[in-house]
Amino acid sequence: MALGATPTPRQTYLHYPTGVGAYEWGGGIGLTLDILSTRLVESEQRFVPRLTGAFRYGFPAGFSLEATLDAIVLVNELRMGLLWSIDTGPVAWALHDRLGLWFGYIGVDGFDTHAVGLVQYPGASVGTIIAGHHLSLAFEVILVHAQRVDFGDASVSRVNTGYGGFSLRLLLESPVGPGVLYYGATFFQASPDYQLWLAFSDGRRKLQFVRFHLGYEF
């Protein structure tokens, strides 16, 4: 590097297993779009967009702290967790466990409903680098620990751990300018009432939906 030249900062990756080093951090903003099955929502809104923000900070020995926030008022979820990763050459691996607090509100046409829930997401991910693009595949189990829905003067709640389903996410992170563009999709097979959009459902059958991701990391 020439004398006086400005060093190029190392890019961090929020979703790749070994995306940040010790004492490095990265943040990002983006959008998600859930496309729900008509069997879930019938005549209601099938497309659920949400703003999303993410943060990751690295520690020694491959550990990192993660936090994400998805928000749309109707459904909001704050997730925090730890990740441990290892690089084995062309492939990187990670184990992670996240705890999510989701909450929401519906207040239209006299329909006043509040909801809150506690969800855990243990899982693992694998990644590789292809021509400078970071490709990762992540699997997570959905464990619902608690849920409460208040509608008017009545309420429904439960406090017991149950299997809510699983998710499988494929994501690509590509360097663009000083940051990283990320895009991909997550496939869910989950119980209808795993989150607020069908909290009143009595069904326990696991149904499928897809979530698309697009955002920018800095």
Image (tube, rainbow, N blue to C red):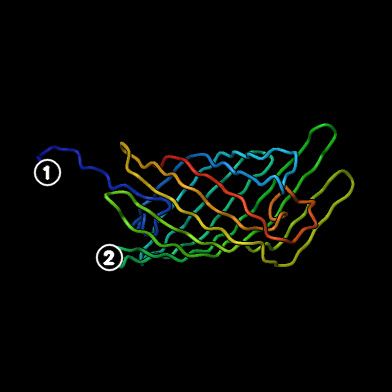
Give the residue furthest to the top. Answer: 109
State which quarter of the image contains the C terminus: top left
Nearer to me, 197 or 59: 197
Q: Residues within 10 Å of mark 2 (few under 14, many from 20)?
A: few
To which quarter of the image does residue 33 belong? top right
Q: Earlier in the sequence, mark 1 or mark 2?
A: 1
Q: Which residue is mark 2?
A: 89
Q: Residue 190's spot in the image, x, y percent?
A: 65, 58
Q: Is residue 158 left or right of residue 216?
A: right
Determine whether the residue tagged by mark 2 lies in a helix, strand or loop: loop
* Residue 42 drawn above or below residue 143: above
* Residue 123 drawn above or below residue 136: below
Q: Nearer the viewer, mark 1 or mark 2?
A: 2
Determine whether the residue tagged by mark 1 lies in a helix, strand or loop: loop
Residue at 63% x, 54% y is: 208
Give the residue furthest to the left. Answer: 2
To which quarter of the image does residue 71 belong? top right
Q: Which residue is mark 1?
A: 1
Q: Is residue 114 left or right of residue 19?
A: right
Q: Please name the amino acid that badge 2 sits on.
A: Gly
Q: Residue 181's spot in the image, x, y percent?
A: 39, 41
State which quarter of the image contains the N terminus: top left
Q: Which mark is residue 159?
A: none
Q: CA distance from mark 1 to mark 2?
A: 27 Å
Q: Residue 198's spot in the image, x, y percent?
A: 74, 49
Callout count: 2
Q: Is residue 204 left or right of residue 125?
A: right
Residue at 84% x, 45% y is: 151
Residue at 53% x, 49% y is: 68
Q: Please name the amino acid that badge 1 sits on.
A: Met
